[in-house]
Image: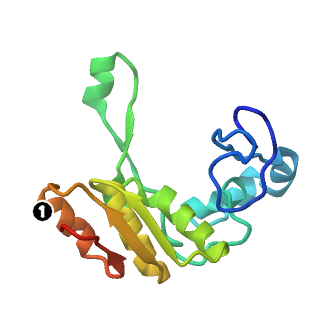
């Protein structure tokens, strides 16, 4: 539904309200979700982002990138001491697959939604993590990806994205 005017929107590939142009937010049927998902049911599911599928904007089970998520937590006792708290845990996204980026989770959901909608080409502007994740997940799903980067982006970041096949670079690179 629209963040500004409250008007409902169809479940289509749109990001803005057709009436006022404001951003759209997801609307959940919390009663249906609570009835379908219990703590016990979640515990029996695979340790990936998809164990929470009812909370994700997909109509069906994911068809690609099914191992994404469940990156480990690492305790940081010195940080806890510095902050004056008992314990601090940090999410270790350096083992996130396939691009080793914290962007893998959101991009996996977006690519699966693109597949549901019949979209064959995806893209993004980025200087790093998002570019890598979009290129990796799109290649895995068989989608073409266009990654838009600054013309003077350092080569190391470009190579990090270019290792994934089936994406397009525009003129000037």
Hey, which residue is sitting farthest top in the picture? Answer: 84
Q: Quadrant of the C terminus?
A: bottom left
Q: Who's the residue at 40% across and 23% down the image?
A: 86
Q: How is the image coloured?
A: rainbow
Circle 1 packing at 10 Å, graded few (<14), some (14-19), many (20+), is few
Q: Is residue 146 left or right of residue 8?
A: left
Above or below, 29 against 51 in this view is above
Residue 167 place in picture, x, y as percent:
35, 76
Q: Is residue 100 visible?
A: no
Quadrant of residue 90 within the rendered picture: top left
Q: Quadrant of the N terminus?
A: top right
Q: Who's the residue at 48% across and 69% down the image?
A: 122
- Depth check: give the residue in front, 127 or 107: 127
Which residue is identified by label 1? 155
Q: Is residue 94 left or right of residue 7?
A: left
Secondary structure under the numbered disc 1 in the rendered image: helix
- Depth check: give the residue in front, 58 or 48: 58
Q: Who's the residue at 19% across and 67% down the image?
A: 172
Query: Tag count in the figure?
Result: 1
- Depth check: give the residue in front, 114 or 100: 114
Residue 79 place in picture, x, y as percent:
28, 27
Q: Who's the residue at 14% across and 55% down the image?
A: 152
Q: Is residue 81 visible?
A: yes
Residue 48 place in picture, x, y as percent:
54, 63
Q: Is residue 70 left or right of residue 8?
A: left
Residue 138 place in picture, x, y as percent:
44, 74
Quadrant of residue 87 within the rendered picture: top left
Q: Is residue 7 left or right of residue 85?
A: right
- Depth check: give the residue in front, 33 or 41: 33
Above or below, 29 against 79 in this view is below
């Amino acid at each position: 539904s629209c963040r500004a005017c409250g008007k409902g929107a169809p479940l289509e590939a749109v990001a803005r309200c057709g009436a006022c142009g404001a951003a759209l937010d997801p609307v959940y049927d919390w009663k249906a979700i609570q009835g379908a998902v219990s703590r016990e049911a979640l515990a029996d599911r695979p340790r990936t982002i998809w164990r929470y599928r009812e909370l994700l904007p997909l109509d069906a089970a994911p068809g690609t990138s099914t191992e994404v998520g469940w990156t480990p937590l690492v305790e940081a006792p010195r940080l806890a001491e510095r902050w004056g708290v008992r314990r601090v845990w940090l999410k270790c996204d350096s083992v996130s697959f396939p691009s080793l980026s914290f962007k893998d989770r959101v991009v996996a959901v977006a690519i699966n939604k693109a597949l549901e909608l019949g979209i064959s080409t995806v893209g993004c502007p980025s200087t790093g993590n998002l570019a890598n994740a979009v290129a990796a997940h799109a290649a895995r799903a068989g989608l073409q990806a266009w990654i838009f980067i600054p013309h003077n982006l350092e080569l190391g970041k470009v190579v990090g994205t270019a290792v994934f096949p089936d994406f397009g670079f525009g003129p000037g690179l």
